[in-house]
Image (cartoon, helix red, strand yellow):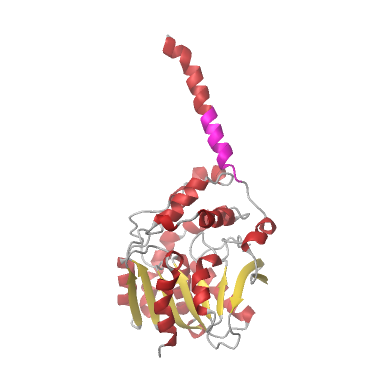
Amino acid sequence: MRTLRLLPWLVLAVILMLLAGIGLSWAPDRSVDSLKARWATAPSQFVTLQGMPVHLRDEGPRDDPEPIVLIHGTSASLHTWDGWTQALKGQRRVIRMDLPGFGLTGPAPDGDYRMERYADFIVALLDQLGVRQAVLAGNSLGGGIAWHTAVRHPTRVTRLVLVDASGYPLQSTSVPLGFRLAQISWLQPVMRQLLPRRMIESSVRNVYADPGKVTPELVDRYVELTLRAGNRESLTQRLKLRETDAQSAGLIKTIRQPTLILWGAQDKLITEPSGQRFHQDIAASQYVVFEGLSHVPQEEDPARSVAPVLTFLTSSH
């Protein structure tokens, strides 16, 4: 009887705990204007392209005949390339952007996040900036976009740098929690209003070999840019296409551009055998593996991961 008398209080306690958790995680969309002060400082600019205000940074010498374009991965932003840009912009024109669906650029008006659509977006951006040919470097999803662009628009891409790139069917040993939840359809109405900071922190730590490098400021960036209006829905739509992406893996063998393949040995999301496959399938490729780094080597150790890029860019074809 005593247990029965306590049951309503136990239920109430559980409900209060759930409500407290929801309250702490409550995170409605934020307008792009509310985020600009922190995440669009100089030299950020916005250009209107394909109906979107595209957030980009364009640095380095304007007379560079082959600028390097840096393309980020899923749920990331142009800030992932801060370290590489510092190392490159003294000698090279460096262009980076927030892809449609992510960062301050936000959702594509047509809701189309296929690889072909992204490849055409990259070329449209090159046209907008007056760039005839470029070196494309991409991480994860951005690597997939880079090589799709090289296949789809071969005359516009002179070289490729693929950093833990997507392309082959995934054989992940661990997937970030945020990606897993974004693929559960019945959770979407809830997840559009909630964003537990601990979930984002866990997801970022998952793609680092050394979780100790994941700072509060880094988590802030991922949290706040995920809250940009429309980005959570865009992530859901993009993740639905991951299996479809792998159907074009056969195109990788058609890549003819000189290609540098970089991989974090501890990558659990796109494991290192994928890097080996890229190297086998791309005839004109070099392959570098970084021990002690994971899925985002450009973030985790910019100096070490950009070093082979500097050599690659100055080598003859």
Q: Position of residue 143 (x, y in %)?
A: 44, 70
Overall secondary structure of the magenta section: helix
Q: Position of residue 62 (x, y in %)?
A: 61, 85
The residue drawn where x is 62% and y is 67% is 55
Q: Position of residue 219 (x, y in %)?
A: 51, 54
| Quarter where residue 265 is shown | bottom left
Closer to the camera in the image, 43 or 6: 43
Q: Please provide the residue range marked out in magenta.
A: 16-27
Closer to the camera in the image, 147 or 105: 105
Which image quadrant: the N terminus? top left
**Which residue occupies the extreme right position in the image?**
33
The residue drawn where x is 49% and y is 73% is 84
| Quarter where residue 25 is shown | top right
- With respect to residue 145, does 234 lie above or below? above
Which image quadrant: the C terminus? bottom left
Q: Is residue 257 visible?
A: no
